[in-house]
Amino acid sequence: MKSLKVALVYKSRSGIIERDRRAIGWWSYPVPEFEWEFIPARGLVETREYRAYDLIFHEDTASAGSYMRSKASDPPIVYLDIDSTLSEQHYQDRMQFARQAELVLIDHDRLERFRACGKSVRRLNYCVNDHIFKPQEKTLDVVYHCSAGESRGLPGGRKRNELRAFLGNYAKIAYLSLRTGAVGLEEYAANMGSTKVVVNWPRTALNRPHRIFDALACRAAMLTGPIPTVDGDDLIFGKHYLNFDSTEELVIGLKMLLDGAWEGCADAGYELVMKRHTWSARAQELRLILREELGL
């Protein structure tokens, strides 16, 4: 199977870290299945500009970029949806954009929500940049790095802020080491790798955050608010992660994990991610999907 040349269109606001040290796993380090060039998303583009490539892979954006097909033989457009579970507007915007593509790939949303776009729809689960997210010496008890965005009206923002305040108070009472707050990628990855337990709260009931897999790749136990079951994730409650609905359940979970149960959960999660959810593994899966759906 030959290596495909990909025009990888990404959110231009993500900046240099997103291009050269990607926090997300897709397209994060070289693999034999693909060669790619990072291209910032922009306004209306004619597909003839991409004739040097085998395909156009457009990462999740709602409004940045649209395409005008110059010839039927121009490279096909593949669209990856990530954020459609954050709100109804997020979903509608991405549904509209998906109609431009020949193939729509869905991270964790329900596939049936996109089949109305009339295009081929396939699952492409999140994968980890395991060159950045990896186990380190466990010097921390708990890490909580859920961004809030309450002042900007982002879903789940208030709950995330409340949990941050609660964890800060509880860590003092229980004499736990805690890292929290907004930090850069390097510090975020270091904290994830150095902790025993990662606490997470999804923004919505439909949302399965990437942080789940980041934590497991770092061999940390995941204690999360309720997350949806996503086909292909292969996450098993009680084995790869625990969840909580309230601060009372959060305390119970923390006590159980930090009393020693964290290691079994962390080991199981790490094994799963290394087997199924690295970029290396996902690239092989994506290559097969492209052959089946587009004949590439």
Image: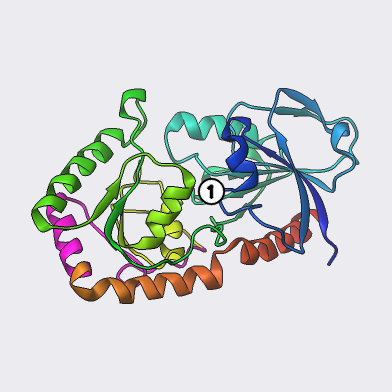
Q: Residue at x 53, y 71 (%)?
A: 274
Q: Considering the image in quadrants, where does the N terminus appear?
A: bottom right
On screen, residue 122 versus residue 243, left or right, reads right
* Image x and y of residue 71, in percent: 91, 34
The region drawn magenta spans 232-257
Q: Is residue 246 magenta?
A: yes
Q: Based on the displayed image, in which of its 4 quarters is residue 119 positioned? A: top right
Q: Residues within 10 Å of mark 1 (few under 14, many from 20)?
A: many
Question: At x 69% / y 32%, what residue is drawn?
Answer: 40
Give the residue at mark 1: 23
Q: Position of residue 62 (x, y in %)?
A: 58, 30
Give the percent coordinates (x, y) of residue 148.
33, 35
Residue at image location 52% in from the left, 43% down from the top: 113
The image position of residue 44, as x and y in percent, is: 75, 23
Q: Is residue 258 left or right of residue 198?
A: left
Q: Looking at the picture, which amino acid does disc 1 mark?
A: Ala
State whether residue 268 is above or below residue 245. Answer: below
Q: Residue at x 58, y 42 (%)?
A: 17
